[in-house]
Amino acid sequence: MKAFKPRVFSGVQPTGNLHLGNYLGAIARFVEMQNSHDCIYCVVDMHAITVWQDPKELARNTREVTAAFIAAGIDPGKHIVFNQSQVHEHAELAWVFNCVARMGWLSRMTQFKEKAGKDRENASVGLFAYPSLMAADILLYLATHVPVGDDQKQHLELTRDIAQKFNNDFAESIAAHGYGEAFFPETEPLIQGPATRVMSLREGTKKMSKSDASDYSRINLTDDADMIALKLRKAKTDPEPLPSEIAGLKGRAEADNLIGIYAALAGTTKEAVIAEFGGSQFSAFKPKLADLAVERLAPIAGEMRRLLADPAHIDAILKDGAERASAIAAETMKGVREVVGFVGGR
Ligand code: AQP
């Protein structure tokens, strides 16, 4: 198989209520990847508008996600941080991928089914085509690794299918234009650690999500210490003490979730947390979890507030990132145009 230069890409939608799941499942992982890879982190505002967004809120949320990236420890000088809509090649490549992806593939996407719900006829075409745009985001940068939460697994499999089909359909043209045996890499999802799917604090079988009507279902990255402690105190649990072995978490979704959150915040494993707290009551465990959550999240919230007080500075970071992203994206699109047979080019 053709070797591609290792590169990381991932994105977060600016749809408000950035939460602990987004942090542990994605942003904290983005921070770790910086030491070993060239990374591109994107605020995916074009994905956000697949469902209605108030324009003023969209701009505010775009700056908020950018601030969260930086406050969490992403370095926009060493790596690339930008918002998707500033690099027009995302839309351009997504169109080509809309013509590569099959209706049947997209119809099987659970996220579309869940978000469109019963009112499918009224869902936007963009919501249906969302995975093509996501494949374009990743493959525009020939990214080899994508850190994401567990809910994005299916979309990443589709990204691989699209890359494979493009490489097969255009194999002759790819070789004829000197790109060897494959134009796009088969991207590897990185879904690892104890918190790849953080669950709602109100219902252990439901994903913690930005759009949950109950604010008590999630810890927002902007929550203050008192609010974090209150939400964890109110978090749903069962009456049993914490188990002494990992197997004891089976069938106890809420306990499993809180143990996973603790492990991820402490940078350890669920086994290690069980070894420390096995046999404890939730009334003893929850305050420890709240202390740890505050210790990890409060500095991020403080830094986000500081950064958000200067929107012009955030906009300048996004513009600089977009210029650097555009240089890579333009190169890829030039190749795609040649391979597909589009005449001319920029
Ligand atoms: N609960 C979660 N646990 C772990 N990871 C999660 N992610 C989202 N929720 C969890 C990961 O966060 C990254 C950014 O997600 P997104 O903003 O692109 O979209 P999303 O998955 O639709 O986010 P929400 O919060 O779940 O929003 P709604 O309510 O709109 O559905 C991704 O890597 C995602 O896996």
Image (cartoon, rainbow, N blue to C red):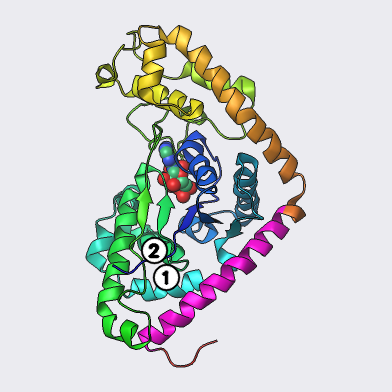
Q: Is residue 174 above or below residue 69?
A: below
Q: Within the image, what quadrant is residue 82 found in?
A: bottom right
Q: Secondary structure at mark 2?
A: helix
Residue type at mark 1 is: Ala
Q: Residue at x 70, y 53 (%)?
A: 314
Q: Nearer the viewer, residue 315 or 206?
A: 315
Residue 230 in view: no
**Residue 132 belongs to the span the image colors magenta:** no
Q: Which corner quadrant holds the C terminus? A: bottom right
| Residue segment shown in magenta | 314-341
Chain-order first, disc 1 or disc 2: 1
Name the residue at 75% across, 54% down.
313
SS label for mark 1: helix
Which residue of the protein is positioned furthest toward the left in this rendering? 104
- The quadrant of the picture showing ligand 1 is top left
Residue 125 — which label?
none
Residue 124 position, x and y percent, is 40, 61
Which mark is in front, 1 or 2? 2
Does any portion of residue 341 appear in the rendered image?
yes
Q: Nearer the viewer, residue 91 or 182?
A: 182
Q: Which residue is mark 2?
A: 135
Give the left or right position of residue 244, taking residue 39 as reference.
left
Residue at the disc numbered 1? 94
